[in-house]
Image (cartoon, rainbow, N blue to C red):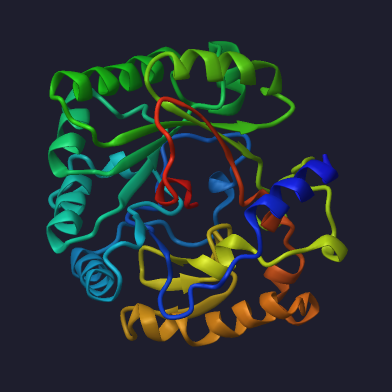
Amino acid sequence: MAETIRRQQSRQGRLDPAERFPKVVLLDTVSHCNLRCSMCVHSRMKRKQGVMPWPLFTKIVDEVAREDPSARVWLVFFGEPLILKNFKPGIFDMIAYAKKAGLKDVVINSNANLLDEASSRRLIEAGLDAIYIGIDACSAKTYAKVRVGGDYEKTVKNVLRLLELKAELKSSKPEVFVQFVEMPVNSAEKAGFVRFWSGKGATVKIRPKVSWAGEVEAENLVLGNESRWPCYWAMRTMSVTDSGKVVLCAVDLDAKFIAGDVTERSLKEVWNGSLKAIRDLHQDGQWEKLPKVCARCRDWQSARAEYHGEAKRSKATRRA
C-alpha cells in the first residue's frame, strides 16, 4: 500500500502553493449533522455547533468573487448543508447568492438523506455546480454500519431522482459525484459500488479514509514523516467555521489551531499571515516546526482520490 501511495503522489507532482489566495475555500455554513458516521468524529465535536450568519457568508463570498471567482467554494465544512433547506435564508439562497456574485465553482457535499425531490429541484434552479454524496456502501447492511442513523434505500432513491431530474430538465448541473471512503468494513463492496453508480450516470469518487488529525484509527495511513510531502489541504485550501474562525485545514474540525478571524480580517489577510508560515514549513519539509496538530497528522497522504464514471473530470472537479 505504501508504494501505491508513493506512485500516486509521484503522478500528482510537487504541489505549488496557492500564493496569493486559496484555490479552495470551505465554509461551515452549518456545523450540525443528522448522521453519526463510523469514520467521522462529529459526535465528539467539542466546538459549539451553529449556522453561519448571513452577513458573514455574504462578506466571504463577495471577497472570493473579487479575488478569484474561479476558486472552488464548498458551502459546507463539517456539517450537513441540507439541514438548512427550510431556513430563511437557507442553503438554496446561499448557492444562488454565490452564483449571482460570479463564483464559478460552487459545491456541497451531503449524505442525501434530506435530498427530497423539492430539494433536488431547488439545487438545480439555484445553479449548484457539483454535489458530492457520501454513501460508502453498496448494501443496506454495510451502509448501516458506516452511515449510522441513515436510510440506505431512501438515500439511493433520492440520488437516482436527482439524476433523473437533471435529464428531465436538460441540465448539466450539478455534477453528481457519489463518494466511497474505502475502509475494511466496506472494501468488498467497492467494485459493486463503482459498477452500480457508473451505470446510473453519476461519477464515482473513491477516496481513502482520514483520521481527522489522529482522532480516529485509519489503517491506510502507513507512511511516516520520513516519507512526507506538502499537504494538499495546507497548501491550497482555507477552512472557515460558522463563527468566522479560520482553522488549520479541512481536518481540523475542532478548531485546535486558529489562524485568524474573518469577521475582523479579510480571507486574503489571513491566508497570507500565519497560514503562509505553515505553507512555507511544508514546502521546506520542516515538519517538526509545525503546530502540534499538524506536525503529528498523517492525513496528508489521504488528500487524493480516484474517479470512475460518466464524465471526464476537469482539474476543478478534482479539487478537495
Assign the N terminus to one quadrant of the image.
top right
Could you tell me residue 169's position as x and y percent?
13, 24
In the image, is 51 to the left or to the right of 270?
Answer: left
Task: Out of 9 and 320, give the one closest to the viewer.
Answer: 9
What residue lies at 83% left-to-right and 61% top-to-bottom? 227
265, above or below 171, in the image: below
Give the side of residue 113 with respect to residue 247, left or right. left
Above or below for 111 versus 130:
above
Task: Answer above or below: position of 8 versus 119.
Answer: below
The image position of residue 124, as x and y in percent, is 18, 35
Q: Nearer the viewer, residue 39 or 232?
A: 232
Quadrant of residue 114 within the rendered picture = top left
Residue 56 visible in the shown view: yes
Q: Residue at x 67, y 50 (%)?
A: 11
User: What residue is drawn where x is 40% and y is 31%?
Assistant: 311
- Camera-side residue of 201 and 81: 201
Residue 48 shown left or right of residue 5 in the figure:
left
Q: Position of residue 234 (x, y in %)?
A: 58, 68
Residue 215: tell me if it is visible: no
